[in-house]
Amino acid sequence: MLDPIVNFFTRVFQWIGRGIGLVIGIILWPFMWAGRWYTERGWILKTILGAIMAGILVAYGYFFYVTQFWKNFDPDYPGPILADTAQQTANLLAGERIETAQATMSGTQGSGDGSATQPPTTAEQTCKPSEIAHMSAFLVDFNVNQNAWISSMLASKLGLFGIPWRNTPWFDNKAAFQLGINQVMRRTTTELVDTLGRARGTSRIDQNLQDARTALAWDEDAWYIGMRGPTRPTPSVYRDAIEKLNAFNASLEKCQATFDARADNLMQFLDRIAGDMGSTSDILRGQIEASNAGWFDPRADDRFWFAYGQLYAYYGILHAARADFSKVIQERNIGTLWDTMMVQMRDALNMQPWIISNGNESSAFFPSHLATMGFNLLRARSQIVEIRAVLDR
């Protein structure tokens, strides 16, 4: 009596096995055909094609390596960067003059005959450099020198058999993280050019800052050859931005450039940051509404890591802004608010899940990491808006 049941399940498993075999055969057929075709060619063509295939395999191997190993990733990175100058110029605004010991002595010693002392000359003075420019140069360096820039790599552009990596669950997290940082760098250099690096928006634009902004506006996925022929790859152009930001700071330290550290400029800068965070949280909300596939949403990871990169970069930039606008923050008594904002942003950076899930927000088994990241962004944004409101009083 059990024979029909046994035979039924036997046929079911046979059909399943044949179906799996058919799928594997379809997947392997192009490779088997290419292998047969390759073995029938002459040795010259084999050598050329073999070299091309070896180059592609090496490129993909390197690509897989650099996407999985993130060098010098450290959410606490702002501390060591700002430590060198934080205590020496803690009560000065960026661009404010600092009298050197030589200048102080020359300004306080008399000539011995009772004549009036001379004030120190510009050559004997230095000005406080901008920590925002310094932090921006560091973050660009982190993206293109300390790590390989993923988006312009050939293997990144080729994708997985033509499928863009962002549409797969693999190898796009680091690229999205870097693009999030780069979004912040573009916003920051724009503010440096338009408001912070010039006096009341009416003076001449600083050429170093303008060149840095232009460099960071370069295509994020440019390779050596583009649609219009040979071009410069993205990392090479971004390295120019590092040089220009450092050149601006060197000029500022010599009191030959301008940093307009006024309260209204800080307020406008915070407005731009709040708007940027709000835009990213809206992107996260759009992905949450578009899919609730949990662990199987291939776009959730790049959305998450883009937002994480943005938060990672703004954490450093806002640390730097506190140093550049130290007097303003002290005079407006917003130090406690600023500290609270920094603590909340740092806590958000502790969220580093191994696999990103975009599940329903009420799900017990598929968490919504995008919703959590969106909450962290909006919480930081609310602190920025509160600080901005105090500055506007």
Image (cartoon, rainbow, N blue to C red):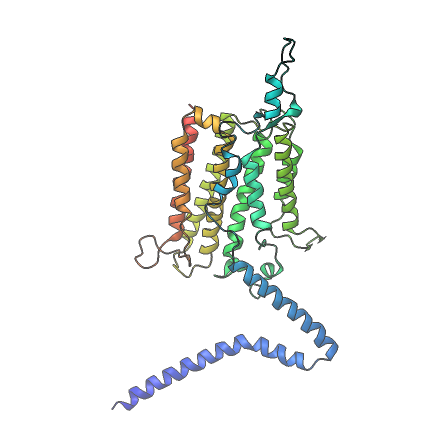
Instruction: Farthest residue to the left: give it.
Output: 1
Is 27 rendered above or below residue 71? below
- Name the foreground residue: 270 vs 258: 258
Residue sitting at the far front:
112
Q: Give the residue displayed 61% in from the left and 54% down from the top.
A: 152
**From the viewer's perspective, is residue 369 above or below residue 315?**
below
Give the residue displayed 49% in from the left and 27% down from the top. Answer: 91
Q: Residue furthest right?
A: 44
Q: Residue 258: give x, y in percent of width and height.
A: 61, 28
Question: Is 388 on the left or on the right of 244, as rendered?
Answer: left
Where in the figure is residue 259, as x and y percent of width and height?
A: 58, 29
Work out which quarter of the rendered image holds the C terminus and state it: top left
The quarter holding residue 380 reads top left
Q: Nearer the viewer, residue 278 or 318?
A: 318
- Residue closest to the eye, 338 or 29: 338
Quadrant location, the N terminus: bottom left
Question: What residue is at 61 percent from the left and 43 percent from the top?
Answer: 216
Q: Is residue 392 visible?
A: no
* Rendering coords of residue 243 (x, y %): 65, 41
Q: Position of residue 391 (x, y in %)?
A: 44, 26
Compare residues 117 and 300 and report the one nearer the observer: 117
Whether residue 375 is visible: yes
Question: Residue at (43%, 52%) from the top-left corner?
Answer: 287
Location of residue 44 with respect to 370 vertically, above or below = below
